[in-house]
Image (spheres, rainbow, N blue to C red):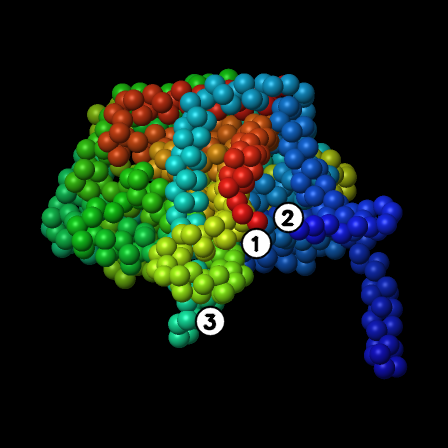
Amino acid sequence: MEKRTVFAGYTLPALLIIPQLLITIIFFYLPAGQAMWQSFQLEDAFGTATQFVGFENYAELFKKPEYFRAMGVTAVFSLLVAGLSLSLSLLLAVMANKQIRGAGIYKTLLIWPYAVAPAVAGVLWLFMFQPSIGMVSKLLMSWGIDWNPTLNGTHAMFLVVLAATWKQISYNFLFFLAGLQSIPHSLIEASAIDGARPFRRFWTIIFPLLSPTMFYLLVVNITYVFFDTFGIIDAVTHGGPGSSTTTLVFKVYNDGRSGGDLGLSAAQSVILMVIVVGLTAVQFRYIERKVNY
Amino acid sequence: MSFYRKAALFAATALTMAASPALAQTEIQWWHAMTGANNDVVNKLAEEFNASQKDYKVVVAYKGSYADTMNAGIAAFRAGNAPHILQVFEVGTASMMSAAKAIKPVAELMKEAGEAFDPKAYLPAVTGYYSNSKGEMLSFPFNSSSSVMWYNKDAFKKAGLDPNAPPKTWPEVFDAAKKLQAAGHATCGFASAWVTWLNIEQFSVWHNVPLATRGNGIDGFDTELKINSPLHVKHLQNLVDLQKTKTFDYSGRTNTGEGRFTSGECPIMLTSSGFYGNVKANAKFDWANAPMPYYPDVQGAPQNSTLGGASLWVMGGKSAAEYKGIAKFFAFLSQTDRQAKLHTESGYLPITKAAYEKVKASGFYAQNPYLETPIKELTNKEPTEYSRGLRLGNLVQIRDVWAEEMEEALAGKKSAQAALDAAVSRGNAMLRQFERTVQK
């Protein structure tokens, strides 16, 4: 089926894409270019002395075992958050898509957290799980769990994963719900008439038809965990205890902001960008093939 | 728009224009990080100064937390519109000092403006913290605090301890904490906020053991950490051992754990003297504070404590008229009566000797002994090379690294020795990094 629109001449199509191009250039290419330029420089926090140092910032970075440790932490954190938020929101969307009483209320409540700023989301969870005053931590302790995220790295990781996942579920939920609603009812009914049970209907009809949404969300979620979660980590654990919740993006933020070392911080963000671009490329290359549009 | 509103608008414009000769006043921007009652103090100071003369006008702006304020100042400097006065917390001192092109030393400023300024008028601990190795004061001390041990007198009574004789040494604190635990504080015998400030920085200074070479960094950026000494290791080992039974309970890197004292959970809390206002407002029990504990087998301990809080930095590149105004404002701030009032109103330390003597003579401390404890600590002995203060670049981040290593030890993942060795080597790497950025 040919869906191509044919324009006569170049003026109109050029005009139509200019706004998008401008946005991409101003908000992506310029800052990214600036970060790259900065990563080759060494300067004090005040910018009174700047010097071009080539790859020295990168070399410094790869000398540090902490940097590799942060990579490991990031891998665990991003797999958990992306996996959990995608699967939980899919489950919730499938449930909310059914004919139930008060579906509107559920939907609104589920979408709500998206309006909460990451740092605020972090603080909310921090309060609930704070060892001395948190309601949930009191419950956990009454079950005999020695809940202590200030010293136990696993507990701290659990907490930031929880906060970051909760924050992202709404967004995923919204897209899954829209995806589900666009699946023609006739297809599902036809398969039901053919005798397919709900479980089978989900995996053979709904899931493949949702795959474009799924693929889009996978890319967006990976970007989210890699770039947008520093606020949560900063508010909840500040990368601790030890460095058990120090992810790459938190290090970028912390080294640049509290360390005032913009060159080193820029070098880290360039590496982070390369990782995310690489991951996205891999996804497009290998996973997109399996997507039915 | 009706005719009358137009007329009113016109009149208002005309009035503003008529009043504009008053705008020949030189404006002085002051960026600060004070909240609550202390924000009011800052506003009032500016109002009083503006009312006291006609040539200069101090305009205050709140810029968020200490770190936010400092970052805002740095960003503004990079963009070429820095404020005249920037309040910077004590851990940012080395970064400010290293930025020679970005700042105007206060001693130089006062001299050029012909304002009287005597560094000796300040408490030695204060002068030491904000002066370079030649003894010139680079910033103007504003709000200072120190760290003390807060304790719950009611809990002491219940545990059979004398509420008027708080423990003086660390072994006494450990014993008291065990008794307090037995008397109902099972989850926390004692705790510490600002875990690295209390247990590494103040700990070193209070025992007169080096925190870092080159006089704790004051004499040069080529300083190396010394916090893996036997005394440091012994203290951390004690905390690690006591953590197992929660006689000591780790409460985070900043002051978020302070609530465990005011809620009554932790009967002993080591933290800033600036905790005063919070305790006074929220503690529903009888409380007091006492000097920080020390190890009695360390010769000469306790020495003196060092400062927390912030000072005012004058930014570089301003006009002579503006500098004159800033100098006038600082002279105004230094007046003894004003210093005394600042101290009794804000709970921060009196930073000049004269102000301290004046408040003392007024009998204020008889009713408020808690405000005198930190001053007694700061002035306990004449400061030495390793107790006059500390000055480490990247200190905000180095504190994080120290805390990371202490957490590893407290969680039982590393020995105290291994943790502090790592704290030293990782901290040294950051000091070198700082040296790299300031010297190139």
Residue B171 is situated, as x and y percent measured from the top left of the image, at 18, 34
Q: Residue at x 27, y 53 (%)?
A: A137
- Residue A19's place in the image compared with A179, above or below, is above
Are circles 1 and 2 on residues that touch, CB within 8 Å? Answer: yes
- Crowdedness of circle 2 by 10 Å Cα count: few (<14), some, many (20+)? many
Circle 2: element type: strand
Q: Do residues under tags 3 and 1 come within 8 Å of each other at their CB atoms?
A: no
Structural crowding at the residue carrying mark 1, measured as other residues with C-alpha within 10 Å and reported as few (<14), some (14–19) or many (≥20): some
Q: Chain of mark 3?
A: A
Under mark 3, the amino acid is: Gly
Disc 2: which residue? B30
> Looking at the picture, how far across and down is residue B303, in whole percent?
33, 30
Instruction: From the image, state whether disc 3 or disc 1 is nearer to you.
Output: 3
Instruction: Give the residue number, with chain letter if any, for mark 3.
Output: A104
As drawn, the residue found furthest toward the front would be A194
Q: Residue at x 78, y 47 (%)?
A: A18
Q: Are marks 3 and 1 on the same chain?
A: no
Which residue occupies 86% across, 64% down? B17
Q: Which disc number belongs to residue B42?
A: 1
Secondary structure, mark 1, is helix
| Between discs 1 and 2, the one toward the N terminus | 2
Check contact, mark 3 vs mark 2: CB within 8 A. Answer: no
> Element under label 3?
helix
Amino acid under disc 1 = Val
Circle 2: residue type: Trp
Asked whether the residues under marks 1 and 2 belong to the same chain, the reply is: yes
